[in-house]
């Protein structure tokens, strides 16, 4: 590790008071007495089970039936998806008090939570084959989310586009998040996928993002781009990054034009009062390929900490970029 930024950050750390706020995510209100009678197709299934309303895994899904399910979810009725593959996407827009239980579900498309949605709880395990996108929404919790590539089952027959937590997002929690094989060709389809997980938003950066366990494998471009305020990521493992094309890419908020084309395992930029407890970076890529760490500028009085770090494989030989105005302290290498 470079002694310059370590010493600089240590001085900042010793001169600052820890102001990290306690993050509390407001849970949705579950309304069990919602009248679902007009939507019932199969009465043998319990209330809230999507099969009750004509939506089954491994079958063609009626657009109208699926809208009915989302309508009930928007009214506060807890919704249950049984195990299997669903050839559809889910968009929650300007909604609140939504509870969905995914029981080992595979979504062929995307999961989007947008337009001032709030108090959304996603229980169980869901595998997303396109992307997870959150913008201008708050108080959202997930148990287990997997974003991976199965092109034969993807609704667009493409690789996945990763996870984007964008402007105006606040109070979002993942128990576990796994992202693998995010696409990175020069096609327009991947134009806005500059990182497998990108947390950013110009002048309205995300706040209070919690991830207990994060794994990113074989990222086509940068693995993790992190901006914002008061994030807590406990355990991060990154294995291989920068495996795809850097052509025809849209930029990342808070980064200078063109910087997104130089890939990093972890890129922290304008990230204030944040904490990463454990970070492990492994790479088999050529050592000339980008940075293992990119530590950009931040507010000196709101330092960000990486408590423990380990690098292995060619990641040990990859360069580390540290801005003269970085506010990041790396405490321990193990």
Image: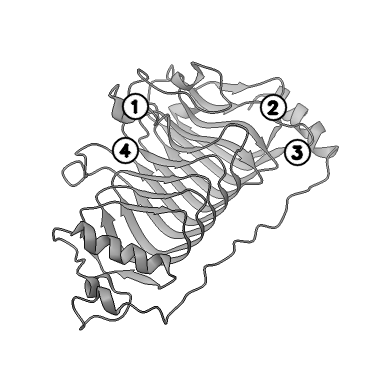
Could you tell which of marks 3 and 1 lies nearer the N-terminus? 1
For disc 1, the neighbor class at 10 Å (few under 14, some 14 to 19, many from 20) is some
Quarter assignment of residue 14 = top right
The residue wearing badge 3 is 302
- SS at circle 2: loop
The residue wearing badge 1 is 243
Separation (CA) of disc 2 from disc 4? 30 Å
At 47% across and 23% down in the image, what residue appears? 251
Out of 282 and 206, give the one closest to the viewer. Answer: 206
Could you tell which of marks 2 and 3 lies nearer the N-terminus? 3
The correct choice, above or below, for 165 with respect to 22 in the image is above
The disc at residue 326 is: 2
The correct choice, above or below, for 237 with respect to 74 in the image is above
Separation (CA) of disc 2 from disc 3? 11 Å
- Labelled pair 2, 1 in contact (Cβ < 8 Å): no
Could you tell which of marks 1 and 4 lies nearer the N-terminus? 4
- The tally of labels here is 4
At 21% across and 39% down in the image, what residue appears? 156
């Amino acid at each position: 590790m470079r002694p310059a930024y370590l010493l600089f950050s240590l001085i900042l750390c010793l001169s600052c008071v820890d102001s990290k706020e306690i993050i509390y995510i407001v849970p949705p209100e579950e309304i069990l007495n919602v009248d679902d009678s007009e939507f019932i197709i199969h009465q043998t299934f319990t209330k809230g089970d999507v099969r009750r309303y004509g939506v089954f895994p491994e079958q063609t899904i009626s657009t109208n039936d699926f809208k009915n399910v989302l309508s009930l979810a928007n009214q506060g009725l807890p919704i249950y998806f049984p195990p299997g593959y669903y050839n559809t996407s889910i968009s929650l827009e300007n909604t609140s008090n939504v509870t969905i239980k995914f029981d080992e579900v595979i979504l062929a498309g995307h999961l989007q939570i947008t337009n001032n949605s709030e108090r959304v709880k996603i229980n169980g395990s869901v595998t997303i084959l396109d992307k997870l996108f959150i913008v201008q929404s708050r108080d959202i919790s997930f148990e287990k989310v997997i974003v991976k590539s199965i092109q034969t089952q993807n609704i667009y027959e493409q690789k996945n586009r990763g996870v984007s937590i964008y402007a105006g997002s606040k109070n979002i929690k993942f128990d576990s998040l796994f992202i693998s094989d995010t696409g990175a060709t020069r096609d327009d389809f991947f134009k806005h996928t500059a990182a497998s997980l990108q947390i950013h938003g110009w002048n309205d950066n995300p706040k209070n993002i919690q991830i207990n366990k994060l794994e990113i494998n074989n990222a086509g471009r940068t693995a993790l781009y992190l901006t914002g305020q008061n994030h807590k990521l406990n355990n991060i493992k990154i294995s291989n990054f920068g495996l795809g094309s850097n052509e025809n890419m849209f930029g990342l908020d808070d980064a200078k034009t063109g910087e997104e084309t130089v890939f990093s395992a972890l890129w922290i930029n304008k990230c204030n009062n944040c904490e990463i407890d454990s970070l492990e970076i492994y790479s088999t890529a050529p050592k000339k390929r980008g940075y293992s760490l990119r530590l950009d500028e931040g507010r000196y009085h709101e330092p960000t900490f990486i408590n423990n770090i380990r690098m292995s494989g060619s990641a040990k030989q990859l360069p580390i970029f540290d801005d003269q105005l970085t506010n990041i302290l790396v405490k321990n290498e193990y």
